[in-house]
Protein backbone atom coordinates (compact mmCIF):
# COMPACT_ATOMS: atom_id res chain seq x y z
CA UNK A 1 0.00 0.00 0.00
CA UNK A 2 1.27 3.47 -0.80
CA UNK A 3 -0.18 6.91 -0.11
CA UNK A 4 2.37 9.11 -1.87
CA UNK A 5 2.03 9.52 -5.63
CA UNK A 6 5.76 10.18 -5.95
CA UNK A 7 6.66 7.02 -4.01
CA UNK A 8 4.09 4.86 -5.81
CA UNK A 9 5.28 6.15 -9.18
CA UNK A 10 8.92 5.46 -8.34
CA UNK A 11 8.11 1.96 -7.05
CA UNK A 12 6.00 1.21 -10.13
CA UNK A 13 8.83 2.42 -12.40
CA UNK A 14 11.21 0.09 -10.57
CA UNK A 15 8.78 -2.82 -11.00
CA UNK A 16 8.50 -2.09 -14.73
CA UNK A 17 12.27 -1.72 -15.16
CA UNK A 18 12.82 -5.12 -13.54
CA UNK A 19 10.07 -6.76 -15.65
CA UNK A 20 10.27 -4.92 -18.98
CA UNK A 21 7.90 -7.24 -20.87
CA UNK A 22 4.63 -6.38 -19.17
CA UNK A 23 1.25 -7.99 -19.74
CA UNK A 24 -1.14 -5.21 -18.71
CA UNK A 25 -4.80 -5.65 -17.83
CA UNK A 26 -6.91 -2.49 -17.60
CA UNK A 27 -10.38 -1.82 -16.28
CA UNK A 28 -12.93 0.95 -15.87
CA UNK A 29 -10.72 2.99 -13.52
CA UNK A 30 -8.47 3.89 -16.46
CA UNK A 31 -11.38 5.70 -18.15
CA UNK A 32 -12.99 7.50 -15.21
CA UNK A 33 -10.76 10.53 -15.89
CA UNK A 34 -12.27 10.49 -19.39
CA UNK A 35 -15.74 11.05 -17.91
CA UNK A 36 -16.92 7.43 -18.15
CA UNK A 37 -18.34 6.19 -14.82
CA UNK A 38 -17.11 2.90 -13.35
CA UNK A 39 -19.18 0.06 -11.96
CA UNK A 40 -17.75 -0.63 -8.52
CA UNK A 41 -16.65 1.19 -5.37
CA UNK A 42 -13.32 0.86 -3.53
CA UNK A 43 -14.61 -2.30 -1.80
CA UNK A 44 -15.49 -3.92 -5.14
CA UNK A 45 -19.25 -3.60 -4.60
CA UNK A 46 -21.73 -2.46 -7.26
CA UNK A 47 -22.41 1.28 -7.23
CA UNK A 48 -25.74 0.76 -9.01
CA UNK A 49 -27.80 -2.15 -10.28
CA UNK A 50 -25.67 -4.63 -12.28
CA UNK A 51 -25.59 -4.26 -16.08
CA UNK A 52 -27.89 -6.14 -18.43
CA UNK A 53 -27.47 -9.90 -18.76
CA UNK A 54 -26.96 -11.43 -22.20
CA UNK A 55 -29.89 -13.84 -21.83
CA UNK A 56 -32.26 -11.08 -20.71
CA UNK A 57 -31.26 -8.81 -23.60
CA UNK A 58 -31.75 -11.57 -26.16
CA UNK A 59 -34.92 -12.98 -24.63
CA UNK A 60 -36.98 -9.91 -23.75
CA UNK A 61 -38.22 -7.13 -26.02
CA UNK A 62 -38.99 -5.04 -22.92
CA UNK A 63 -35.40 -5.37 -21.74
CA UNK A 64 -34.17 -4.23 -25.15
CA UNK A 65 -36.57 -1.26 -25.07
CA UNK A 66 -35.16 -0.20 -21.70
CA UNK A 67 -31.57 -0.81 -22.78
CA UNK A 68 -31.75 1.18 -26.02
CA UNK A 69 -33.82 4.02 -24.57
CA UNK A 70 -31.24 4.53 -21.84
CA UNK A 71 -28.39 4.16 -24.34
CA UNK A 72 -29.91 6.81 -26.57
CA UNK A 73 -29.48 9.22 -23.65
CA UNK A 74 -26.27 7.87 -22.09
CA UNK A 75 -24.06 6.87 -25.00
CA UNK A 76 -22.87 10.44 -25.52
CA UNK A 77 -20.53 9.92 -22.52
CA UNK A 78 -18.70 7.22 -24.47
CA UNK A 79 -18.95 9.01 -27.80
CA UNK A 80 -17.54 12.27 -26.44
CA UNK A 81 -14.98 10.76 -24.03
CA UNK A 82 -11.45 12.04 -24.42
CA UNK A 83 -8.22 10.15 -23.87
CA UNK A 84 -6.97 10.49 -20.28
CA UNK A 85 -3.47 10.88 -18.88
CA UNK A 86 -3.62 7.22 -17.85
CA UNK A 87 -4.27 6.14 -21.44
CA UNK A 88 -1.42 8.31 -22.67
CA UNK A 89 0.99 7.01 -20.02
CA UNK A 90 0.22 3.39 -20.93
CA UNK A 91 0.74 4.20 -24.61
CA UNK A 92 4.06 5.81 -23.69
CA UNK A 93 5.14 2.64 -21.86
CA UNK A 94 4.44 0.65 -25.03
CA UNK A 95 6.37 3.16 -27.13
CA UNK A 96 9.30 2.80 -24.70
CA UNK A 97 9.26 -0.98 -25.23
CA UNK A 98 7.85 -2.11 -21.87
CA UNK A 99 4.52 -3.59 -23.03
CA UNK A 100 4.22 -7.13 -24.35
CA UNK A 101 0.43 -6.87 -24.55
CA UNK A 102 -2.34 -4.67 -23.17
CA UNK A 103 -5.63 -6.45 -22.53
CA UNK A 104 -8.49 -4.13 -21.67
CA UNK A 105 -11.85 -4.95 -20.14
CA UNK A 106 -13.10 -1.57 -21.39
CA UNK A 107 -15.16 -1.19 -24.56
CA UNK A 108 -14.43 2.50 -25.25
CA UNK A 109 -11.41 2.09 -27.61
CA UNK A 110 -9.59 4.91 -25.78
CA UNK A 111 -6.34 2.93 -25.54
CA UNK A 112 -6.18 2.80 -29.32
CA UNK A 113 -6.97 6.50 -29.60
CA UNK A 114 -4.12 7.22 -27.16
CA UNK A 115 -1.69 5.40 -29.44
CA UNK A 116 -1.48 1.91 -27.94
CA UNK A 117 -1.06 -0.70 -30.69
CA UNK A 118 -0.71 -4.02 -28.83
CA UNK A 119 -4.29 -4.06 -27.54
CA UNK A 120 -6.88 -6.79 -27.14
CA UNK A 121 -10.43 -5.58 -26.44
CA UNK A 122 -11.32 -8.51 -24.18
CA UNK A 123 -14.98 -7.53 -23.85
CA UNK A 124 -15.37 -6.14 -27.37
CA UNK A 125 -16.19 -2.61 -28.49
CA UNK A 126 -19.24 -0.44 -27.93
CA UNK A 127 -19.05 1.67 -31.09
CA UNK A 128 -20.33 -1.05 -33.44
CA UNK A 129 -23.39 -3.32 -33.47
CA UNK A 130 -24.16 -6.61 -35.18
CA UNK A 131 -27.28 -8.60 -36.00
CA UNK A 132 -27.55 -11.76 -33.93
CA UNK A 133 -29.29 -13.55 -36.83
CA UNK A 134 -27.59 -12.61 -40.09
CA UNK A 135 -24.40 -10.87 -38.94
CA UNK A 136 -25.26 -7.48 -40.47
CA UNK A 137 -22.79 -4.92 -39.10
CA UNK A 138 -23.20 -1.18 -38.60
CA UNK A 139 -21.73 1.69 -36.62
CA UNK A 140 -23.40 2.46 -33.31
CA UNK A 141 -23.85 6.17 -34.09
CA UNK A 142 -25.80 5.29 -37.25
CA UNK A 143 -28.14 3.05 -35.27
CA UNK A 144 -28.63 5.78 -32.68
CA UNK A 145 -29.53 8.24 -35.42
CA UNK A 146 -32.22 5.85 -36.64
CA UNK A 147 -33.56 5.37 -33.09
CA UNK A 148 -33.58 9.10 -32.42
CA UNK A 149 -35.68 9.57 -35.56
CA UNK A 150 -38.07 6.85 -34.40
CA UNK A 151 -38.18 8.11 -30.79
CA UNK A 152 -37.94 11.92 -30.72
CA UNK A 153 -39.43 12.12 -27.21
CA UNK A 154 -36.76 9.84 -25.77
CA UNK A 155 -33.99 11.50 -27.77
CA UNK A 156 -34.84 14.79 -26.06
CA UNK A 157 -34.46 13.39 -22.54
CA UNK A 158 -31.44 13.90 -20.32
CA UNK A 159 -30.12 11.87 -17.40
CA UNK A 160 -26.94 11.16 -15.48
CA UNK A 161 -24.35 9.05 -17.24
CA UNK A 162 -23.80 5.43 -16.21
CA UNK A 163 -21.04 2.98 -17.20
CA UNK A 164 -20.56 1.84 -20.80
CA UNK A 165 -22.96 4.30 -22.39
CA UNK A 166 -25.91 3.61 -20.09
CA UNK A 167 -27.94 6.36 -18.37
CA UNK A 168 -29.61 6.63 -14.97
CA UNK A 169 -33.02 6.93 -16.59
CA UNK A 170 -36.20 5.43 -15.18
CA UNK A 171 -39.48 5.97 -17.01
CA UNK A 172 -42.10 4.04 -18.98
CA UNK A 173 -40.13 2.40 -21.79
CA UNK A 174 -43.07 0.52 -23.34
CA UNK A 175 -43.52 3.14 -26.06
CA UNK A 176 -39.90 3.00 -27.23
CA UNK A 177 -39.40 1.69 -30.77
CA UNK A 178 -36.33 -0.54 -31.03
CA UNK A 179 -34.43 -0.36 -34.32
CA UNK A 180 -33.97 -3.91 -35.59
CA UNK A 181 -31.70 -5.25 -38.32
CA UNK A 182 -32.51 -3.45 -41.59
CA UNK A 183 -31.55 -6.56 -43.55
CA UNK A 184 -33.42 -9.37 -41.77
CA UNK A 185 -35.32 -7.82 -38.86
CA UNK A 186 -33.16 -9.63 -36.30
CA UNK A 187 -31.89 -8.35 -32.95
CA UNK A 188 -29.09 -5.80 -33.13
CA UNK A 189 -26.62 -6.00 -30.23
CA UNK A 190 -23.50 -3.98 -29.46
CA UNK A 191 -20.29 -5.90 -30.18
CA UNK A 192 -19.73 -6.22 -26.44
CA UNK A 193 -19.49 -9.27 -24.19
CA UNK A 194 -22.42 -8.89 -21.80
CA UNK A 195 -22.60 -10.41 -18.36
CA UNK A 196 -23.67 -14.02 -18.77
CA UNK A 197 -21.95 -14.26 -22.16
CA UNK A 198 -18.44 -15.59 -22.82
CA UNK A 199 -15.32 -14.00 -24.30
CA UNK A 200 -14.79 -15.38 -27.83
CA UNK A 201 -12.24 -18.22 -27.61
CA UNK A 202 -9.88 -16.71 -30.22
CA UNK A 203 -9.68 -13.47 -28.20
CA UNK A 204 -9.04 -15.33 -24.94
CA UNK A 205 -6.34 -17.49 -26.56
CA UNK A 206 -4.61 -14.43 -28.01
CA UNK A 207 -4.47 -12.92 -24.53
CA UNK A 208 -3.12 -16.17 -23.09
CA UNK A 209 -0.47 -16.37 -25.83
CA UNK A 210 0.72 -12.90 -24.89
CA UNK A 211 0.92 -13.96 -21.27
CA UNK A 212 3.32 -16.77 -22.19
CA UNK A 213 5.83 -14.19 -23.46
CA UNK A 214 5.47 -11.76 -20.55
CA UNK A 215 7.71 -11.25 -17.52
CA UNK A 216 5.05 -9.82 -15.20
CA UNK A 217 1.40 -8.79 -15.02
CA UNK A 218 0.23 -5.31 -14.12
CA UNK A 219 -3.48 -4.76 -13.46
CA UNK A 220 -4.51 -1.11 -13.71
CA UNK A 221 -7.85 0.37 -12.63
CA UNK A 222 -9.67 -2.92 -12.19
CA UNK A 223 -11.18 -4.67 -9.19
CA UNK A 224 -10.79 -7.97 -11.06
CA UNK A 225 -14.21 -9.03 -9.78
CA UNK A 226 -15.16 -10.27 -13.25
CA UNK A 227 -13.71 -13.74 -13.85
CA UNK A 228 -12.79 -13.07 -17.50
CA UNK A 229 -10.04 -10.73 -16.26
CA UNK A 230 -9.26 -12.38 -12.93
CA UNK A 231 -8.52 -15.70 -14.64
CA UNK A 232 -5.38 -14.23 -16.22
CA UNK A 233 -4.03 -13.15 -12.82
CA UNK A 234 -4.61 -16.69 -11.57
CA UNK A 235 -2.83 -18.12 -14.60
CA UNK A 236 0.09 -15.71 -14.22
CA UNK A 237 0.41 -16.57 -10.52
CA UNK A 238 0.40 -20.30 -11.37
CA UNK A 239 3.16 -19.63 -13.92
CA UNK A 240 5.26 -17.93 -11.25
CA UNK A 241 4.99 -14.48 -12.78
CA UNK A 242 4.91 -11.44 -10.50
CA UNK A 243 1.44 -9.85 -10.42
CA UNK A 244 1.04 -6.19 -9.44
CA UNK A 245 -2.00 -3.91 -9.15
CA UNK A 246 -2.55 -0.17 -9.31
CA UNK A 247 -6.08 0.79 -8.29
CA UNK A 248 -8.03 2.82 -5.77
CA UNK A 249 -9.49 -0.16 -3.91
CA UNK A 250 -9.45 -3.85 -3.20
CA UNK A 251 -9.17 -6.45 -5.94
CA UNK A 252 -10.30 -10.04 -6.19
CA UNK A 253 -6.64 -10.98 -6.69
CA UNK A 254 -5.26 -9.29 -3.55
CA UNK A 255 -3.99 -12.63 -2.18
CA UNK A 256 -2.03 -13.26 -5.41
CA UNK A 257 -0.34 -9.87 -5.69
CA UNK A 258 3.40 -9.34 -5.53
CA UNK A 259 2.97 -5.56 -5.32
CA UNK A 260 -0.06 -3.37 -4.79
CA UNK A 261 -0.47 0.38 -4.99
CA UNK A 262 -3.77 1.93 -3.92
CA UNK A 263 -3.33 5.37 -5.38
CA UNK A 264 -4.76 7.60 -8.13
CA UNK A 265 -3.97 6.07 -11.50
CA UNK A 266 -3.10 8.94 -13.82
CA UNK A 267 -0.55 10.77 -11.61
CA UNK A 268 1.14 7.52 -10.56
CA UNK A 269 1.42 6.24 -14.15
CA UNK A 270 2.69 9.62 -15.34
CA UNK A 271 5.26 9.67 -12.51
CA UNK A 272 6.40 6.15 -13.41
CA UNK A 273 6.88 7.16 -17.05
CA UNK A 274 8.95 10.20 -15.98
CA UNK A 275 11.13 8.03 -13.74
CA UNK A 276 11.73 5.55 -16.56
CA UNK A 277 12.53 8.34 -19.01
CA UNK A 278 15.10 9.76 -16.58
CA UNK A 279 17.05 6.50 -16.44
Image (tube, grey):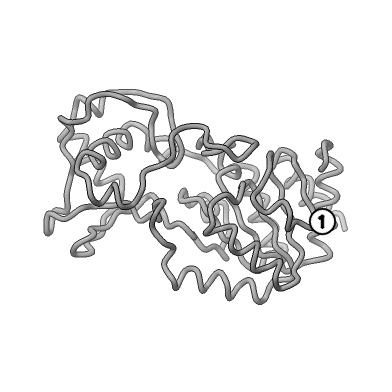
Residue sitting farthest toward the left: 184
Considering only vertical position in the picture, is 214 above or below 96? below
Neighbour tally class for label 1: few under 14, some 14-19, many 20 plus, Cα within 10 Å: some
* Camera-nearest residue between 222 and 128: 222
* Camera-nearest residue between 51 and 24: 51
Left or right relative to 217: residue 166 = left
Q: What's the residue at 54%, 62% (across, down)?
A: 119
Q: Secondary structure at mark 1?
A: helix
Considering only vertical position in the picture, is 256 above or below 155? below
Residue 13: % across, % down: 81, 54
Left or right relative to 244: residue 119 = left
Considering only vertical position in the picture, is 139 above or below 61? below
Residue sitting farthest toward the front: 255
In the rendered image, which residue does mark 1 sit on?
A: 276
Q: What's the residue at 21%, 38% (across, down)?
A: 62
Residue 27: % across, % down: 57, 49
The tally of labels here is: 1
Q: Which quadrant would the C terminus be assigned to in this image?
A: bottom right
Q: Which quadrant would the N terminus be assigned to in this image?
A: top right
Residue 73: % across, % down: 33, 31
Q: What's the residue at 52%, 56% (across, down)?
A: 112
Q: What's the residue at 65%, 36% (across, down)?
A: 42
Left or right relative to 262: residue 235 = left
**Quarter of the figure with residue 24:** bottom right
**Quarter of the figure with residue 201:** bottom left
Residue 194: % across, % down: 39, 52
**Quarter of the figure with residue 216:** bottom right
Amino acid sequence: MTQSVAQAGAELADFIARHPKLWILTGAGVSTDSGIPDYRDAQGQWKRSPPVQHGDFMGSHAVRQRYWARALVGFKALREAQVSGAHRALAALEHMGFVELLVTQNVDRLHQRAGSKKVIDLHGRADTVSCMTCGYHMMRHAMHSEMAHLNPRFAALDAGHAPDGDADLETDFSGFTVFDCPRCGGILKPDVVYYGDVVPPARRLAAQTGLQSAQAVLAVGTSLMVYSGYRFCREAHAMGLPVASLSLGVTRADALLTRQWRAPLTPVLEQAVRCLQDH
